[in-house]
Amino acid sequence: MQTRVVIVPGWRDSGPGHWQSLWEERIPGAARVVQDDWASPKREAWVSTLAKLILDSPGPVVIAAHSLGCIATAHLPPEAAARIQGALLVAPADPERRAVLSDFAPVPYAALPYRSIVVASSNDPYCPIRLAGAYSRAWGSEFVRMQNAGHINIDSGHGDWPLGLALLQSLTDEPAAWSAGREFSENLATT
């Protein structure tokens, strides 16, 4: 059974040109979480919507989350988390930095029951690199530190993001035509 890629945008969604939107178009069978309220996120509603999409999927899923979507993923109930094969958690948000995101605090500091990769930037305005590293350690995630990559979104020049696609592919069991032949070169460090 083919693994489904589930795209989990963060606060205010990911617009046209964002790597999540481009991947949604490129990856056959990909599903995108659509929240009822992107502007005033509530943890219970966001996590419930994400869990339903995962549980309604025909087989295992791989998560491609950004910002607050990473935190929603960490809050998933066990029955939904059990269906996840892997998760790419990019530029996780710090819900304590903005009042509108505070419903997602506290962030769970427990190991995730699936393979995961946290990608964070040294100059992300929404989450200090040290906090992203702490999430990564607590979640048992591999950690990729990008140098001066901002919030790893369209505003920081990460529309078509080949490195991210390669990292996502590394979480799946099967070869994927959507990532074949892609090349990347980015200034990063892994730990």
Image (cartoon, grey):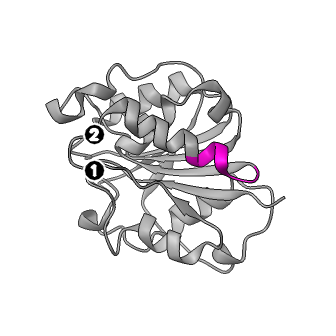
Along the line of sight, the residue nearer the viewer: 42 or 133: 42
Where's the N terminus, which quadrant? bottom right
Q: Residue furthest left?
A: 99
Which of these two is toward me, 57 or 12? Answer: 57
State the image coordinates of residue 27 (x, y, percent, origin top left).
61, 72
Q: Say what secondary structure mark 1 lies in.
A: loop
Q: Which residue is painted at 35% across and 41% down in the image?
A: 68
Task: Please name the residue shown 44% across and 64% down the image.
Answer: 20
Q: Which residues are magenta?
A: 53-59
How many numbered discs, if any?
Answer: 2
Q: Which residue is label 2 attached to?
A: 41
Q: Secondary structure at mark 2?
A: loop
In which quadrant is the C terminus drawn? Answer: top right
Whether tag 1 and tag 2 are in contact, CB under 8 A, the answer is yes
Residue at the spot 43% in from the left edge and 31% down from the top edge: 133
Image quadrant assignment for residue 3: bottom right
Q: Position of residue 52 (x, y in %)?
A: 56, 43
The image position of residue 78, as x and y in percent, is 64, 25
Q: Residue at x 55, y 39 (%)?
A: 51
Callout 2 crowding tier (Cα within 10 Å): few <14, some 14–19, many ≥20: many
Q: Which residue is mark 1?
A: 38
Left or right: residue 114 compared with residue 143: right
Q: Is residue 108 left or right of residue 157?
A: right
Query: Up-down: is 134 above or below 72?
Result: above
Q: Is residue 132 part of the magenta span, yes or no?
A: no
